[in-house]
Image (cartoon, rainbow, N blue to C red):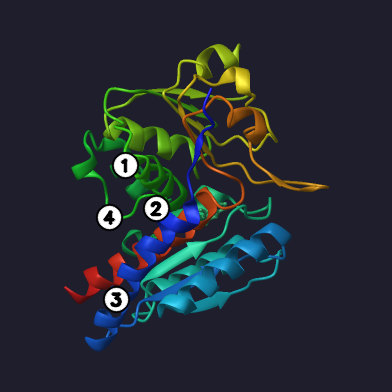
Amino acid sequence: MPQAKIIDGKQVAAKLHQALKEEVVALTKQGVTPGLATVRVGEDPASQVYVQMKEKACAMIGIMSRGIRPPADISQEDLIAQIEELNSDSNIHGILVQLPLPGHLNTPTVLQHVNPDKDVDGFHPLNLGKLLSAKYWEELPRFIPCTPAGVIKLIDSTGVEIAGKQAVVVGRSIIVGKPVAMLLLARQATVTICHSRTSDLGALTRTADILVAAVGVPQLIKGKMIKPGAVVIDVGVNRLEDGLVGDVDFNQAKEVAGYLTPVPGGVGPMTIIMLLTNTVRSAKAQLS
Ligand code: GUN
């Protein structure tokens, strides 16, 4: 059995990077510097790393980023007030509220207060609703969630057609599982969503021509759970003592899959570039 082709997320992201940089230059010349506010509540170590990576990527491409760092014990009212301020700031085109939020905050309520026109994460109920309403790709809202958008770009980078295929998504989060399932559906795949209560997960994942793993369980997807030749996208980022691993057992999967993303270096770089893409899109919309 030939080994899976490894999908290089860094390379796919780099290609998008250059074009985006040119768009930022053009926008800046027209007097609009795209601006992204990153709201990180508290000091969650993983969130610190993610937000730092996002801000670094902004700087590399010429997007202005503004870090908002409320303490972990901020009240919901005060957090919403800070978001409202960003909503009315014309230098800010995108607002990202890093998740997860501390337990005393109601995430959907907080996200509801992000102006849908600045919702570069695509988590506002209006944008999620539009995502649900879209029958075809062309009908999708301006902002679709970044990691799911990146997953589709990675699948497209393989040249494998999505329409008509069996796609299985493992995970049902609002950040990845649900929106990626909707995107695959809009691309006319037949989609199955699996989760922690799914019985005989392997029987379902083995039907997948396209398998997206986004459950946060280290190396849950073993080689025998994969259909030979499948496109396998591993969204998992699990920190173990001996390093970072995905939701897919990489060494086993590469013996079976046709295409496979590594962790790190697969989905991660795509999430960031899609966030920058959404921010530039937002700035452009403001210009017109
Ligand atoms: N936490 C994990 N992934 C994401 C993401 O894509 N956006 C935000 N805001 N928080 C996250």
Distance of mark 1 from mark 3, alpha carbons? 28 Å
Q: Does the residue at mark 1 contact the one at mark 2 (Cβ under 8 Å)?
A: yes
Q: Nearer the viewer, residue 135 or 212?
A: 212
Q: Earlier in the sequence, mark 4 or mark 1?
A: 1
What residue is pinned by disc 3?
Answer: 22
**Label 1's element?**
helix
Q: Earlier in the sequence, mark 1 or mark 3?
A: 3
Residue 122 is marked as 2
Q: Earlier in the sequence, mark 3 or mark 4?
A: 3
Q: Does the residue at mark 4 contact the one at mark 1 (Cβ under 8 Å)?
A: no
| Mark 2 close to ligand 1, CB under 8 Å | no
Residue 85 appears in the rendering:
no
Q: Amino acid at mark 2?
A: Gly
Badge 4, how many Cα within 10 Å: few under 14, some, many 20+?
A: some
Q: Nearer the viewer, residue 83 or 159?
A: 159
Distance of mark 1 from mark 2, alpha carbons? 9 Å
Q: Position of residue 32 (x, y in %)?
A: 28, 83
**Label 4's element?**
loop
Distance of mark 3 from mark 2, alpha carbons? 24 Å
What residue is pinned by disc 4?
Answer: 142
Q: Earlier in the sequence, mark 2 or mark 4?
A: 2
Closer to viewer: mark 3 or mark 4:
3
Distance of mark 4 from mark 1, alpha carbons? 10 Å
Q: Position of residue 169 (x, y in %)?
A: 48, 29
What residue is pinned by disc 1?
Answer: 131
Closer to viewer: mark 1 or mark 3:
3
Q: Amino acid at mark 1?
A: Leu
Please determine whether, in this image, residue 121 is positioned above or below residue 79.
above
Please determine whether, in this image, residue 61 is positioned above or below residue 129.
below
Q: Position of residue 276 (x, y in %)?
A: 40, 66
Left or right of residue 228, residue 219 in this image? right
Distance of mark 3 from mark 4, alpha carbons? 20 Å
